[in-house]
Image (cartoon, rainbow, N blue to C red):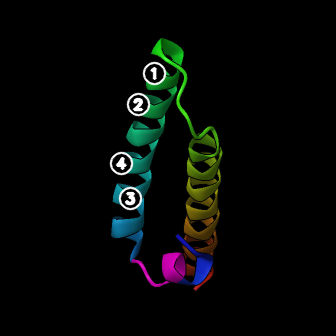
Amino acid sequence: MKTPEIRELSVKDLRERIDTDKVNLSRLKMAHAVSPIDNMSKIKKARRNIARMLTVLRETESKQNKK
């Protein structure tokens, strides 16, 4: 998910999306521990996507607090 797409989401949707992506990331890690997955970049992409969403969430929350 690209940053402009993330910025279009509401705070509630963003939090829900972060929670589901964290669950998916933990499942990917568990699957990799049991048997190595073919594409290791999936874990890296998931981590970075979560980080992007958390950054945008903090930005929007700080903007709302300043107003």
- Are the residues flagged by discs 1 and 2 in contact, CB closer than 8 Å? yes
The amino acid on which the numbered mark 1 sits, given as a three-letter code, is Met
**62 left or right, relative to 21:** right
Single out the mark in the foreground, 4 or 1.
Answer: 1
Quadrant housing the C terminus: bottom right
| Residue depicted at 34% across the width and 68% down the height | 13
**SS for dot 2:** helix
- Give the alpha-carbon distance from disc 1 to disc 2, as whole Å: 5 Å
Write down the quadrant of residue 16 in the picture.
bottom left
| Furthest-front residue in this view | 38
Residue 27 got which mark? Answer: 2
Single out the mark in the foreground, 2 or 4.
Answer: 2
- Are the residues flagged by discs 4 and 3 in contact, CB closer than 8 Å? yes
Residue 43 got which mark? Answer: none
| Residue depicted at 63% across the width and 62% down the height | 52
Q: Mark 1: few, some, or many residues within 10 Å (few <14, many ≥20)?
A: few
Magenta highlight on residue 48? no
Magenta segment: 5-9
Q: Dot 1 corresponds to which residue?
A: 30
Q: Mark 4: few, some, or many residues within 10 Å (few <14, many ≥20)?
A: few
Q: Dot 4 corresponds to which residue?
A: 20
- Are the residues flagged by discs 4 and 1 in contact, CB closer than 8 Å? no
Nearest the viewer among 66 and 43 is 43
Q: Dot 3 corresponds to which residue?
A: 17
- Give the alpha-carbon distance from disc 3 to disc 1, as whole Å: 20 Å
**17 left or right, relative to 45:** left
Residue 32 in the image: x percent, y percent?
52, 23
Nearest the viewer among 17 and 40 is 40
- Give the alpha-carbon distance from disc 4 to disc 3, as whole Å: 5 Å
| Residue depicted at 58% across the width and 58% down the height | 49
